[in-house]
Image (tube, coloured by chain):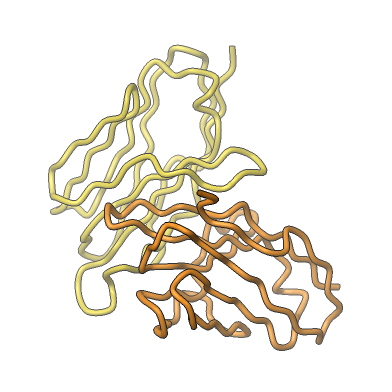
Amino acid sequence: QQPVQSPQAVILREGEDAVINCSSSKALYSVHWYRQKHGEAPVFLMILLKGGEQKGHEKISASFNEKKQQSSLYLTASQLSYSGTYFCGTEIRGSGGYQKVTFGIGTKLQVIP
Amino acid sequence: NAGVTQTPKFRVLKTGQSMTLLCAQDMNHEYMYWYRQDPGMGLRLIHYSVGEGTTAKGEVPDGYNVSRLKKQNFLLGLESAAPSQTSVYFCASRSSYNEQFFGPGTRLTVL
């Protein structure tokens, strides 16, 4: 089951903030976040393993609400380099769910000057 | 340290032809994955492997076969290519810290 991401696309001016959401209909073991620039391979941002956990990387952070099976990626004071497509990937609890990461369709983010 | 490499980078096939995509990683990772990426569809898991000699089906396995005879290599085969298999194929390996490292991708066109 592919996780659902929202919004599908967003345009920001430099310095603005954005939130990208990811939700699943299944109980989650972990949530992964990746960014892909045009014509390139996806690059790992972070993984969240525990319910309610928040992790951060410079001005990009994320939260994971295990009970709601949701994760959110927070981009603060956006920079031009943040442009790209953001994917969440989920691992589902239960037999056969571990080790297999299923990605959403992505959120295209464009930061303009 | 090359990370994850994929061969070839580009390929054009005619319907019905066969081919093998090679993925190699030099990080000694146990887990490896094959994804396809199509516009508006995101990354979809084709097959994956949790160790040498093991493979498992992902979300869209039909029309593909895989083999993991050596830990560092993960092969994706198309026995009889169809236009619906036109896509960009990414291989990835996963570290013990759960980070997936993606290869540069193979752009495949089936005419």
Image location of residue A67, percent across then percent down: 13, 54
Colour of chain A in the rendered structure image = yellow
Which residue corresponds to the image point at 22% horizontal and 54% vertical from the top-left? A69
Question: Is A39 above or below relative to A13?
Answer: below
**Badge count:** 0
Residue reaching furthest to the front: B1
Image location of residue B81, percent across then percent down: 75, 81
Q: Quadrant of the C terminus of chain B?
A: bottom right
- The quarter holding residue A78 reads top left
Residue displayed at 38% across by 63% down: B29
Q: Residue at x 72, y 74 (%)?
A: B84
Q: Nearer the viewer, residue A58 or B38?
A: A58
A70 left or right, relative to A108: left
Q: Is residue A48 left or right of residue A45?
A: left
x then y, percent, for residue B46: 52, 73
Left or right for B72, reference A66: right
Q: Which chain does orange denote in the image?
A: B
The residue sitting at 44% across, 67% down in the picture is B32
Is B78 located above or below residue B30 in the figure?
A: below
Between A86 and B107, the residue placed more toward the observer is B107
Tell me if residue B90 comes above or below residue A50 in the rendering.
below
Q: Is residue A11 above or below residue B54?
A: above
In the shown orientation, is residue B111 left or right of residue A45?
right
Residue B89 coordinates in the image, percent (x, y): 62, 63
